[in-house]
Image (tube, rainbow, N blue to C red):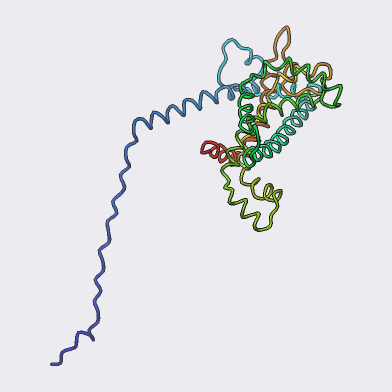
């Protein structure tokens, strides 16, 4: 009887037993977290309800809008209020004026604020700290307190510089630009400061000029901050009523959308359907602007908080 050596025997593999995967038990949510989420939902509903009521009133018939027992819905939506808004004379011109003024303020404030923030951050000069403090003080002064001095300034400036006097779009662009720059410069200063100076030194070693570093390296890095400041500049300019009411006196063709809503306020009875429809039309560009820049806006606000 021959004995087969152990090396020649076929190997028997022991299969490992399958592991039993137990379902993960979800930890019960903490009470404070549930309370915070419920509070956030409640606050969101409170904030969104006026917008919902504005849009709803724009589609309601006149009888439901002026009813003594308003309902948060309508079974007979109509477009009559929107027809009255777009049939209104020069409404399209008012819309174009608002776009022109807001667009000019956004572009000019972003460009000037970027250059100014770079200057006060990268360069050392006298009265630099004083200049930064003046930016903060400028934010504390209410716009209403400066309306009358700005009126006389625009009146006198119009005799020396054509295009920026009363009854012109320049009289709307210049004040908004002046009021939006301090906030934009102060906010962009943190973004520029967050960029290390070694990056600029490396770019100089590679042969890049200061202007090339400024626009090809620094500008893309602070772009989220520029978007965040541009949103605030756009909203404040788009919704402004004080400056058009104060500076546009006789040239009504240079009015903006907030002034166009005054047509629907009548002595005998206000056209609330037209007011709500016009307000809805005014809100649409702001929503579109938010949708286009929402990603960079979130990163810009996060960078501002970190700075």
Q: Position of residue 193 (x, y in %)?
A: 58, 41
Is residue 44 something one can see in this rendering?
A: yes
Q: Position of residue 306 (x, y in %)?
A: 51, 38
Tell me which residue sits at (26%, 69%) in the image: 15
Tell me which residue sits at (47%, 29%) in the image: 41
Give the camera-side residue of 104 and 189: 189
In the picture, measured across the screen, residue 17 lies left or right of residue 164, that is left
Is residue 287 something one can see in this rendering?
A: no
Q: Is residue 280 above or below residue 123?
A: above
Tell me which residue sits at (74%, 22%) in the image: 85
Give the camera-side residue of 18 and 138: 138
In the picture, measured across the screen, residue 251 lies left or right of residue 204, that is right
**Which image quarter: residue 237?**
top right
Give the camera-side residue of 18 and 181: 181
- Residue furthest to the top in view is 268
**Which image quarter: residue 111?**
top right
Q: Is residue 202 above or below residue 156?
A: below
Give the camera-side residue of 185 and 289: 185
- Residue furthest to the bottom in view is 1
For the N terminus, the quadrant is: bottom left
Q: Is residue 129 above or below residue 263?
A: below
């Amino acid at each position: 009887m021959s004995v087969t050596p152990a090396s020649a025997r076929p190997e028997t593999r022991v299969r490992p037993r399958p592991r039993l995967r137990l379902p993960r038990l979800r930890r019960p949510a903490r009470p404070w977290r549930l309370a915070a989420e419920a509070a956030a939902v409640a606050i969101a509903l409170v904030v969104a309800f006026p917008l919902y009521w504005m849009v709803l009133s724009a589609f309601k018939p006149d009888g439901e809008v002026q009813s003594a027992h308003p309902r948060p819905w309508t079974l007979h939506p109509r477009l009559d209020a929107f027809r009255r808004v777009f049939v209104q004379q020069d409404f399209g011109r008012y819309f174009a004026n608002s776009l022109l003024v807001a667009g000019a303020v956004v572009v000019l404030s972003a460009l000037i604020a970027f250059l100014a923030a770079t200057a006060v951050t990268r360069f050392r000069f006298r009265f630099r700290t004083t200049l930064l403090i003046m930016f903060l003080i400028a934010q504390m002064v209410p716009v209403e307190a400066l309306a009358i001095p700005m009126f006389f300034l625009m009146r006198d400036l119009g005799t020396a510089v054509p295009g920026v006097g009363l009854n012109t779009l320049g009289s709307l662009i210049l004040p908004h630009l002046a009021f939006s720059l301090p906030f934009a410069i102060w906010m962009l200063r943190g973004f520029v400061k967050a960029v290390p100076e070694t990056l600029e030194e490396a770019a100089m070693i590679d042969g890049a000029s200061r202007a090339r570093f400024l626009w090809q390296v620094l500008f893309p890095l602070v772009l989220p901050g520029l978007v965040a400041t541009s949103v605030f500049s756009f909203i404040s300019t788009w919704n402004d009523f004080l400056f058009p009411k104060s500076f546009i006196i006789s040239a009504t063709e240079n009015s903006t959308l907030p002034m166009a809503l005054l047509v629907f306020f009548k002595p005998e009875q206000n056209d609330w359907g037209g007011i709500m429809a016009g307000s809805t039309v005014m809100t649409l560009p702001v929503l579109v602007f938010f949708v286009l820049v929402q990603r960079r806006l979130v990163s810009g606000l996060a960078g501002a908080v970190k700075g």
